[in-house]
Image: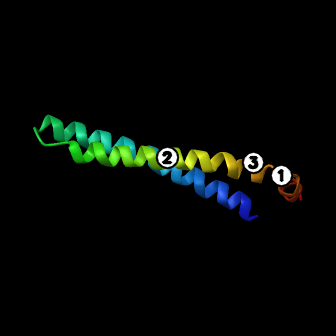
Amino acid sequence: MHRLKDLQDLLGAHQDSVVTRQVLRDLSLRAYADGENTFTYGLLHARQAAAADRNLSAVAAARDRARRRKVRRWLKQ
C-alpha cells in the first residue's frame, strides 16, 4: 500500500534529520574545541531542524491516511 510507504518514507526522513543534527552537533563541538569557526554547523543544524518540522507536519497527515479502514483491512489479510 502506497499510504504505508509514504508514512515510512516520512518517518525515515525525520530519523535521518535527527541523526544528522546529532552528528553536526558533535562535529561543531570538536571544531569549537579546536578554535575553528562553527557558524556553518549551526546553519546546517537549523536547516535540518526546519526540515524535521516540515516532515512532522506531513507525518501527521500520512499517519491519518494510513489509519483508514481500507488500509487496516489490507493489513489483516
Q: Which residue in the structure is indicated by mark 1?
A: 68
Q: Nearer the viewer, residue 75 or 64?
A: 64
Q: Residue at x 80, y 49 (%)?
A: 67
Dot placed on the residue nearer the N-terminal end, 1 or 2: 2
Question: Please, what is the three-letter code of the amino acid marked with disc 2?
Answer: Ala
Q: Where is residue 40 in the image (x, y as percent from the top left)?
A: 24, 48
Q: Report the side of 8 relative to 2 (left or right).
A: left
Give the position of the C terminus as an image quadrant. bottom right
Question: Please, what is the three-letter code of the amino acid marked with disc 3?
Answer: Asp
Q: In which quarter of the image is residue 28?
A: top left
Question: Please, what is the three-letter code of the amino acid marked with disc 1?
Answer: Arg
Q: Position of residue 26 (x, y in %)?
A: 29, 39
Q: Are marks 3 and 1 in contact (CB under 8 Å)?
A: yes
Q: Do the residues labelled 1 and 2 touch (CB within 8 Å)?
A: no
Dot placed on the residue nearer the N-terminal end, 2 or 3: 2
Q: Report the side of 51 relative to 75 (left or right).
A: left
Give the position of the N terminus as an image quadrant. bottom right
Q: Is mark 3 on a helix, strand or loop?
A: helix
Q: Report the side of 33 relative to 10 (left or right).
A: left
Looking at the picture, does residue 7 appear above or below residue 52? Answer: below
Any mark on residue 39, and which? none
Q: Which residue in the structure is indicated by mark 2?
A: 52
